[in-house]
Structures are given as structure tokens and as C-alpha cells.
Amino acid sequence: MEASTEPLTPLQSAPLIDPFGRAISYVRVSVTDRCDFRCVYCMSEHMAFLPRRDLLTLEELDRLIAAFVARGTKKLRITGGEPLVRHDVMRLFESLSRHLETGALEELTLTTNGSQLSRFARRLFDCGVRRVNVSLDTLNPELFRQITRTGSHELVMAGLEAAQAAGLKVKINVVALKGVNENEFITLVEFAHSRGFDITFIEVMPLGELDGPERIDQYLPMQIVREKLSAKFTLQDSDHRTAGPARYVRASETGGRIGFITPLTHNFCESCNRVRVTCTGKLYMCLGQEDAADLREPLRASRDDRALHAALTEAIGRKPKGHDFVIDRAAQVPAVMRHMSMTGG
Ligand code: SAM
Ligand code: SF4
């Protein structure tokens, strides 16, 4: 899978910098909207998935990513849906590893539900992946089934072991769900830190319409998560930062790191260096806003990447300063209508 070899003009290869001076160095790409789970906060039970022709092909994804890398992307996160259920996705990882070899890309990571890690952990490592984020909201197999509807806890546990055995650094992502997993936060931290994993708690975001429980009823502010953890751990502020929006503390008792993501507040917009691309090639300049640029059309228009680069320049010129998430009991619709599985976490 080769990207276009057309030489770029200086303008086409200029780093992507938005109107607020933020260099776009971190891109998340969703490679599929499909998933083997149906997490209650993410998908409805009977999701209608996109027709395959709407999805970018692996070749198109590869070209698109190469264009971002040429324009200054240093960190790339592959996500979904569940990225590892995309047919032949390892072919994409194998191809992307060339950007790590040249040093243009500093990090290639993925966010996964872990169900396929037993199969793919070793190959991911061989492609240069060194860290994976694995979603795990509970250690209770019964509750795991209720939250994911179709997921197997056992498979994810095996996946975590495989990841570790392959040499991948693991971060556990926990969506904090009021009345669902809130009594497990301490146990989850103990579990993660005992295995040398980082762990991050995430507030539920108002993305997409669901047929399950109301988002407002699931919402648990990070402050409460922190308070619950403080009952057991001494939380020391840490200046550790990743390319993502999490703020970190260290638990003195375990020595391990705990992250908190509070997307509903504006505390990370100023330093936002990120954009997201959906599996259909829509570029979202901000997770919390509807504005998007279509990259599929310029990708399909020709093998030449000029139109694609022009679309990138134009889109980044529209990256907004911040977002407006609101979980509001009075509002009957979510603040942003698309599902997380469209834009990727
Ligand atoms: N399937 C993979 C997974 O679950 O890790 C990758 C995609 S998933 C959409 C990425 C992350 O988004 C997961 O950590 C998931 O828990 C989180 N997520 C999904 N819907 C969410 C929501 N409404 N609010 C907050 N986080 C959400
Ligand atoms: Fe699938 Fe991830 Fe969404 Fe759960 S959170 S339904 S695993 S895409």
C-alpha cells in the first residue's frame, strides 16, 4: 500500500497550524464504526452500521494518514468502533509502521475493547505499537456483560495478558457510570496498578442517541471519582502529560498513575492539538462541535494528494477555539448527535 509519490509544494507540506496557533500534532482515526460490543453509553442495542462503500478503504486510510504525517502529525491513535474487528486492519498497521521507521511519526497507538488482543498483540508490537488503551469498566463478569451487552470479560482479560506478554504498555480506560460501576473504582485502580497499568477515568459524554439509560442518569462528575479514590489512596498531583486531555495524579500507596478526563469542562481546549477523522473520512476539528470537513471526496477524486492537502489546510483554518458540551435535563437531545463510535474515543 503506497501513498502517492507526487512531490508536495511548500504550501502543501506546511505544518498544520490552526488560527489560534495550535499545531495539529495528534490525530485520531476511526477505522470502522462496527464493534463486537454494544456498550450502553456508546451504542444502541440495534445499531445500524454504515454501508461498506461509505467507509474509507485501508488504502485511503493509509494515504490520509500519510498526508497528516507529512503535515506534522507526531502521534496517531487508531480507534473505532472496535478497530481490531476491521477486516485486515493489521495490513494498515504494517503499512503505517514506515512512518515510525523514518521518525516522522513518534507514536502509533490504538484504543481497543481488548477482545481481539490475544490474536493481535504480538503483531501490533512488531508494527511499532508500544502502548494500547484498553476499555474496561468493571471487573465483575456479570456487570461487564450488562454494560457491554455482548462482550466477554474473559476474552478481555486474556487480551490484557497477551498485550503485556507482547511488551505493550497498557492503560485502562474506565467510563465512570453513576450507580453502575462507582463502587469499583478503588478495585479497578488496585487491579491496574498491581499489573503495572495506568488507569484513566472518563466522564460520560453526551454523544449520540441511545435507547438505553438516560445519559444524565449515568453522569458522574470526576470530582466524585476523585473523592471516592481519596478514601483509599493518597493522590499526589503529577505533572505527567500525554498527548491526550487527561490530567494525572499518582497514588502514593501503589506508586501508579491515575488519569481523569473531564471533557464536559473546558479545561483542555486551549492546548488542544488534536483532530479526529471518522471511518468515512470526515475530519472533526473539535470533538464537541458539529463542524466537519469531508476528506473522502478529495481522496477519491484522484490519486494525486493535492486536493486532499488543500482540504486539510482549509479545515484546520476552521478549528474552533473550544466546545460547548452540556448535559442538561431540559434538553431532549444530546449536545452532539453523532455516536462516539463514529468519531472514536
Ligand atoms: N472500541 C474501543 C474501546 O471501547 O476502547 C475504541 C472506541 S471507543 C468509542 C473509545 C473510548 O470511548 C472508550 O474508552 C469508551 O469507553 C469511550 N466512550 C464511548 N462512548 C462514550 C461516551 N458516551 N462518553 C464517554 N466515553 C465514551
Ligand atoms: Fe464498542 Fe468501544 Fe463503543 Fe464499547 S465503547 S460499544 S467497545 S466502540
Image (tube, grey):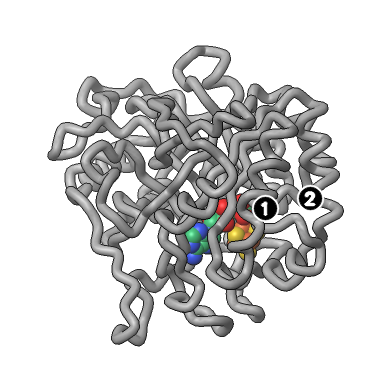
Report the image quarter containing ligand 1: bottom right
95 versus 344 height, above or below: above
Q: In the rendered view, does 33 fall on the left or right side of 243? A: right
Residue drawn where x is 75% and y is 55% of the image: 139
Residue 243 visible in the current orientation: yes
Give amino acid for label 1.
Answer: Leu
Q: Residue 156 got which mark?
A: 2
Q: Are marks 2 and 1 in contact (CB under 8 Å)?
A: yes
Horizontal side, residue 50 vs residue 309: left or right: right
- Residue under the point 33% across and 27% down: 71
The relative height of residue 139 versus residue 334 in the rendered view (above or below) is above
Amino acid type at mark 2? Val
**Farthest left residue?**
19
Q: Which mark is residue 136?
A: 1
Report which quarter residue 257 is drawn in: top right
For marks 2 and 1, the one nearer the N-term is: 1
Q: Position of residue 222 (x, y in %)?
A: 43, 55
Question: Does 217 appear above or below 230?
Answer: below
Task: Please state the horizontal and vertical placement of residue 208, each as a whole percent of the image.
Answer: 45, 72
x, y percent for residue 25: 35, 30
Identified at 45% across, 31% down, the residue is 236
Report, in whole angstroms, how far the alpha carbon at label 2 lies from the one at label 1.
Answer: 8 Å
- Look at discs 2 and 1 and give the one toward the viewer: 1
